[in-house]
Image: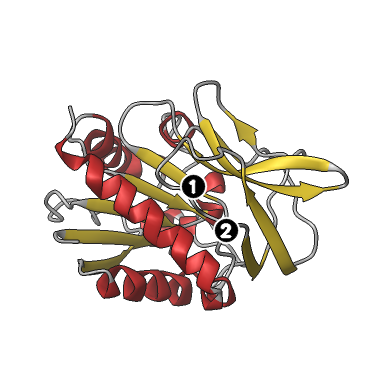
């Protein structure tokens, strides 16, 4: 692979208390670097995208944190950030990989869930206790990410009852109480977007099959750069 990736990790209003975004973001960055990409890691600050240029891949590792206008600005201060992010993906053709709690971030940006193709819904979405988890390809051989991919096993959270938008293409599911729940999908919205619900913390990336999934996702996103 070639090019460069920008990894946005949660801080302030987008860093929740359940996830170590900095550690996970660095682990993801190391995997991207190992695949041949140059990587920048930046925290979610209102000015984070102002001088970022146009990456070949944008990765979001962020959640829903503490709102403190005195520290990182009120909602209005973040409007340019969200407009820039959406523009890079939907108009600029920058592929987006949204990881795990990214389904529950940027609630102040109405376009985010449409871009990702789904989201965590407060009061509905949930996960069983973290532990050994199994994620099963749901797309057969019909998509490059899942073609030839076996079950993915990792020590992780299993997100369940996520809201998946019409048009999104489910690639992997996880079973809970006899029901298969979508956890990985490509978005049917604007841009080239894949949501991957795995990756609660660095232990997820200790799994070879989880790392293979990540590699396949990144390869597919980057392969689409030249498409119209």
Q: Residue 49 appears at what percent x and percent y?
A: 21, 52
Label 2 element class: loop
**Residue visible at 23% across and 34% down in the picture:** 87
Q: Quadrant of residue 59?
A: bottom left
Q: Is 188 situated left or right of 203 in this image?
A: left
Label 1 element class: loop
Q: Quadrant of the N terminus?
A: bottom left
Instruction: State the colouring used for the structure image.
Output: secondary structure
Q: Quadrant of residue 139?
A: top right
Estimate the spatial distance between the alpha carbons at disc 1 and disc 2, rounded to whole Å: 15 Å
Q: Is 6 situated left or right of 71 in this image?
A: left
**Residue visible at 44% across and 33% down in the picture:** 187
Q: Quadrant of residue 10?
A: bottom left
In this view, 9 is above or below 179:
below
Q: Residue 69 appears at what percent x and percent y?
A: 43, 53
Residue at image mark 2: 198
Q: Quadrant of the C terminus?
A: top left
Residue at image mark 1: 146
Q: Is 13 situated left or right of 48 in this image?
A: right
Q: Is 61 situated left or right of 81 in this image?
A: right
Classify 10 Å Cα crowding around label 1: few (below 14), some (14-19), many (20 and above): many
Label 1 vs label 2, nearer the camera: 1
**Residue visible at 51% across and 73% down in the picture:** 208
Q: Is residue 218 visible?
A: yes
Classify 10 Å Cα crowding around label 2: few (below 14), some (14-19), many (20 and above): many
Q: Are marks 1 and 2 in contact (CB under 8 Å)?
A: no
């Amino acid at each position: 692979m070639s090019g460069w990736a920008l990894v946005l990790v949660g801080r302030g209003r987008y860093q929740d208390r359940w996830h170590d975004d900095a550690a996970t973001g660095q682990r993801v960055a190391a995997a991207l670097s190992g695949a041949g990409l140059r990587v920048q890691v930046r925290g979610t600050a209102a000015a984070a995208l102002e001088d970022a240029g146009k990456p070949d891949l944008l990765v979001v590792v962020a959640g829903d944190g503490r709102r403190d206008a005195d520290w990182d600005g009120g909602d209005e201060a973040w409007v340019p950030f969200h407009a820039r992010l959406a523009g890079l993906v939907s108009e600029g053709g920058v592929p987006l990989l949204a990881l795990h709690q990214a389904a529950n971030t940027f609630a102040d940006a109405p376009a985010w869930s449409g871009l990702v193709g789904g989201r965590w819904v407060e009061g509905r979405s949930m996960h069983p206790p973290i532990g050994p988890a199994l994620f099963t390809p749901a797309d057969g051989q019909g998509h490059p990410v899942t073609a030839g991919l076996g079950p993915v096993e990792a020590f992780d959270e299993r997100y369940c009852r996520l809201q998946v938008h019409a048009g999104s293409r489910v690639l992997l599911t996880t079973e809970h109480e006899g029901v298969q729940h979508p956890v990985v999908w490509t978005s049917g919205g604007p841009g080239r977007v894949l949501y991957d619900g795995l990756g609660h913390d660095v232990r997820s990336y200790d799994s070879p099959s989880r790392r293979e999934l990540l590699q396949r996702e990144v390869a597919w996103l980057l392969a689409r750069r030249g498409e119209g």
